[in-house]
Image (cartoon, helix red, strand yellow):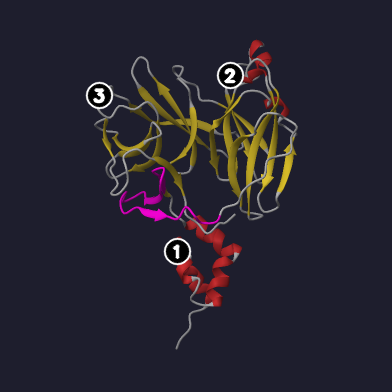
Amino acid sequence: MARLPLEMINEIICRLRVKDLLRYRSVCKEWCSLMDGPGFIRTHFKRSKPGIFIDDYFNLYWVDLDSLDSPIRLDKSEKYTKLPFNNTDSPYPPAVIGFGYDPFINDHKLLTSTIISRGKDMSDSLCEFQLYCVKAKTWERLTQDFSDNFGYDDFGRHALVSTSLYWLVMPRRQEAEHGSSTQFVFAFDLVTYKVSKFSLPNFEREPELCTLGVELGGCLCLLCPYNEPERSLDNWVMKDLESSLGPTWAKQFSVARSDGPGYFVYGVPLKYYKTTDQLLLYVDCERLILYDLRTKTTKDVKIPGIPESVGALLGVRSLVGI
């Protein structure tokens, strides 16, 4: 019987779903060894299509972004890794900024911040930043280039793009008193440890509380809600990140927020459907809607077997383990 070359087998099976690959590991030792290899895992990860992880507080599901049906229930009892606390003398618990993957050393990393000196409010507080490597089981204190950013950081509004974590930063109180009160984006690369600062877009009008996110083509986006003169949600996308001239912001779309049925306060764009000119949005941290950019109307997304109120997160199913 003719036998396919291993290179061709690799090219075929790296296009399969994670669920199928886990079953096919038992075909033979050669296939098992192939699928466990770091090269195969990286290739499969790059080719994996994003979908939505949905949590109804009892079960975890995976839903295809294109069909929005046939949810796959995931096993929450799969193995996990419990991380130790970082070593600080602070009486305050650490805040998690973000979690990401370093493909070059095949390890996950967790970035945290801990208050070491608390002022009247967070803008007067000093923080210590630490990075934890999961496989190496080591904590590393970060000092270089972080000293200017001890102060108020809203870690609840971070985003992971490629290998870098981004979050919004307000200057410390004393800097604000000297005219440096403009909020900006701070970035930390989990691979190179390089830090960067980016200014916000030139807004035509001052938005309410802005939020960072990752959407559509995997770009960093800034979501800006407005209440006056009309309710709307603008989505800005950072482009030309690797340009020698520096990145630029471009307003991608504006979503009207009506007061009638379908009203929402906050929304994260998950996918744009070009054929219907519709946006899939996760709104108010509880439900999915489709927003028609032409008619400016909304429609609730109902997925069979899933409650209306859920948690949703854009992600990729992969063989990358911790």
Regarding residue 86, the answer to whether it shows in the image is yes
Q: Is residue 29 above or below residue 233?
A: below
For discs 1 and 3, the disc positioned in front in the rendered view: 3
Secondary structure of the residue carrying tag 1 is loop
Residue 188: image x %, image y %? 64, 37
Start and end of the magenta stretch?
52-79
Q: Earlier in the sequence, mark 3 or mark 2?
A: 2
Q: Mark 3–mark 2 contact, CB under 8 Å?
A: no
Circle on res. 15 = 1
Q: Is residue 301 left or right of residue 10?
A: left
Residue 186: image x %, image y %? 61, 31
Q: Is residue 177 above or below residue 19?
A: above
Residue 253, located in which quarter of the rendered image? top left
Residue 301, located in which quarter of the rendered image? top left
Residue visible at 32% across and 46% down in the picture:
306
Instruction: Name the foreground residue: 8 vs 176.
Output: 176
In the rendered image, residue 138 lying in the magenta stretch gets the answer no
Label 2 CA crowd tier, 10 Å (few <14, some 14–19, many 20+) = few
Q: Amino acid at mark 3?
A: Gly
Residue topped by disc 3: 260
Secondary structure of the residue carrying tag 3 is loop
Residue topped by disc 2: 182
